[in-house]
Image (cartoon, rainbow, N blue to C red):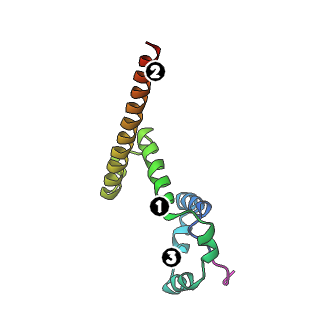
């Protein structure tokens, strides 16, 4: 078990860690990493993992979209967000509103074009 590396960037690990943190007090003491652990993790060649993992920008876009959905569905309140997350959500929703405006103008133009063709 000492030679195995625990992958902490997977979704299942994060979910498991979350539930263990809620239901176990002992887990908090086990989760302490030493400096040697971090050095081991940084020295490992992760080329295969990087080749199959999502691009960082795509991954962050997915996280932003999930956070935005949680905000809109009132699963998360604004008070629970950090200042950085609030700024991200403001830019996300501004871009979203702009894209919706563009789509609406295109639809309006198509409707006007169809009306002119039928007349």
Region of the chain picked out in magenta, as a range: 1-5
User: Which labelled disc corresponds to residue 114?
Assistant: 2
Judge whether residue 3 is colored magenta.
yes
- Which disc number belongs to residue 32? 3
Does 71 appear in magenta?
A: no
Q: Nearer the viewer, mark 2 or mark 1?
A: 2
Secondary structure beneath dot 3 equals: loop
Q: Are marks 2 and 3 in contact (CB under 8 Å)?
A: no
- First in sequence: mark 3 vs mark 1: 3
- As drawn, is 22 to the left or to the right of 2? left
Q: Which residue, given by chain and number where applicable, does mark 1 sit on?
A: 57
Upstream in the sequence, badge 2 or badge 3?
A: 3
Say which quadrant the C terminus sits in. Answer: top left
Q: Is label 1 in a helix, a strand or a loop? A: helix
Q: Residue furthest right?
A: 1
Q: CA distance from mark 2 to mark 1?
A: 39 Å
Q: Is residue 31 above or below residue 72?
A: below
Of 18 and 110, nearer the camera is: 110
Q: Is 41 on the left or on the right of 67, as rendered?
A: right
Q: Residues within 10 Å of mark 1 (few under 14, many from 20)?
A: few
């Amino acid at each position: 078990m000492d030679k195995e590396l625990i992958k902490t960037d997977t979704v299942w690990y994060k979910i498991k860690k979350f539930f263990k943190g809620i239901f176990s007090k002992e887990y908090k003491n086990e989760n302490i990493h030493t400096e040697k652990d971090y050095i081991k993790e940084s020295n490992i060649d992760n080329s295969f993992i990087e080749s199959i993992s999502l691009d960082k920008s795509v991954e962050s876009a997915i996280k932003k979209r999930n956070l935005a959905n949680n905000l809109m569905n009132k699963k998360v309140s604004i008070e629970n967000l950090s200042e950085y997350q609030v700024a991200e959500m403001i830019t996300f929703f501004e871009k979203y509103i702009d894209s919706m405006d563009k789509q609406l103008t295109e639809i309006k133009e198509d409707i006007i074009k169809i009306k002119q063709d039928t007349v």
